[in-house]
Amino acid sequence: MLSKKIKINPKIQEALENNKPIVALESTLISHGLPYPENIKVAKESIKAVEESGSAAATIGIINGDIIIGLNENEIEVLASSKNVEKVSLHNIALSLFYKHNAATTVATTINIASKIGIKFFATGGIGGVHLGSEDNSDISADLTELSRNRMFVVSSGAKSILDLEKTYERLETYGIPRVSYNSDYMPGFWYDETPYTVDKNFKNIDELANYLKLVEEINHNSSVLIFNKVPKKYSIEKNLIKNWIIASIEKAKKNLVRGKDLTPFLISEINTLSKNKTLEANKALIINNALLTGKISKKFNC
Ligand code: PSU
Ligand code: MN
């Protein structure tokens, strides 16, 4: 039986009961990844993109200690605009429920919750991964462990550019997580379109990709599958430009003693400023684009 702490939106309940395609969306990118009011627009446009493709969109978050599957407009507004929204991963989610907080779910917690109720697809911007300097600070996102523990079909533009992408790529392989893509030979770098790391398979056709995912399900593969979708060309930023912004913002984070779960939101926001919002525009575009692709794949998968 599902916990009373999990509240499912009637629209999503109906889709679950009738075996309709559903795409989960996360809320950390709303509360901690994008500034207000752009975050609300992106949240709404992502839902719209999923629905236009014929799937139901379930944005997941925590309101007053209840896990909501399918946040409504008011609830999205709360998570987008309140100052005291927690960022919850697996280590702190139960505390947040216990103390009845408002909280945003990361990739890790969204996957964990969505798979409990049988949602198979999830769209995000960029996953968390192995941070630069992990040899010293051991900062590795729980997104990776949760991807390894639940079978979810996850569309992203790779791992966030601020990370050690080579180590992240290798870690995915260690955990047995297939790294496939839609229309690119390499893993994308979030704000830029190509890293040097080759994908396990570049699918050029959604039918074939959906059929492959059916096989993954049929063999009861234990981990998630990562489906990479690069940032739309028009928004892709030159890698070397980004590199300088990353170095500068990591320096600033060190000076200000920003660590742990505050690090990723701090770096993203610093880099948005340094790039005069070029990275913000790329981030917005890729999130909506990923939602659209996920909706299409999940619809095909369901046929
Ligand atoms: N994708 C975005 N922006 C974000 C995130 C993803 O475009 O802010 C969030 C996700 O929720 C992801 C989190 O789980 O960043 C990673 O945080 P950390 O590095 O602390 O694990
Ligand atoms: Mn971390």
Image (cartoon, rainbow, N blue to C red):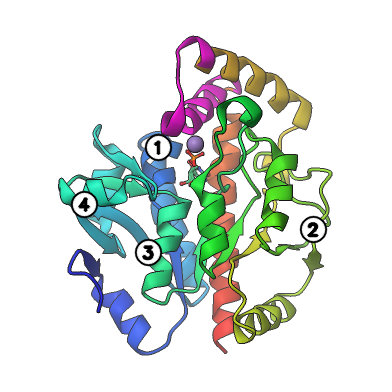
Quarter holding the N terminus is bottom left
**Residues at marks 2 and 4, CA–CA distance in whole angstroms:** 38 Å
Give the crowd class for mark 1: few <14, some 14-19, many >=20 residues within 10 Å: many
| Residue at the top extreme of this rendering | 255
Most foreground residue, 274 or 202: 202
User: Counting residues from the N terminus, which is met first, the one under dot 2 or under dot 1?
Assistant: 1
Quadrant location of residue 178?
A: bottom right
Give the residue number, with chain letter if any, for mark 4. Answer: 97
Q: Which tag is nearer the camera, tag 2 or tag 1?
A: 2
Is 204 rendered above or below residue 253?
below
Q: State the extent of the magenta-drawn residues as a range.
A: 254-275
Q: Nearer the viewer, mark 1 or mark 4?
A: 4
The residue identified by callout 3 is 113
| Circle 1: residue type | His
Q: Along the horizontal axis of the image, is 295 left or right of 3? A: right
Nearest to the observer: residue 44 or residue 217 = 217
Label 3, label 1: how far apart the Cα atoms are? 19 Å
Left or right: where 260 falls relative to 296: left
Does the numbered disc 1 mark a residue whose Cβ is under 8 Å from ligand 1? Answer: yes
Disc 2 or 4, which lies upstream in sequence? 4
Q: How many marks?
A: 4
Q: Amino acid at mark 3?
A: Ile
Residue labelled with disc 2: 199
Q: Picture coordinates of residue 48 (x, y %)?
A: 44, 63
Label 2 sits on a secondary structure element that is loop
Q: Position of residue 263 (x, y in %)?
A: 48, 28
Residue at x 23%, y 45% (from the top left corner): 78
Residue at 36% in and 82% down: 16
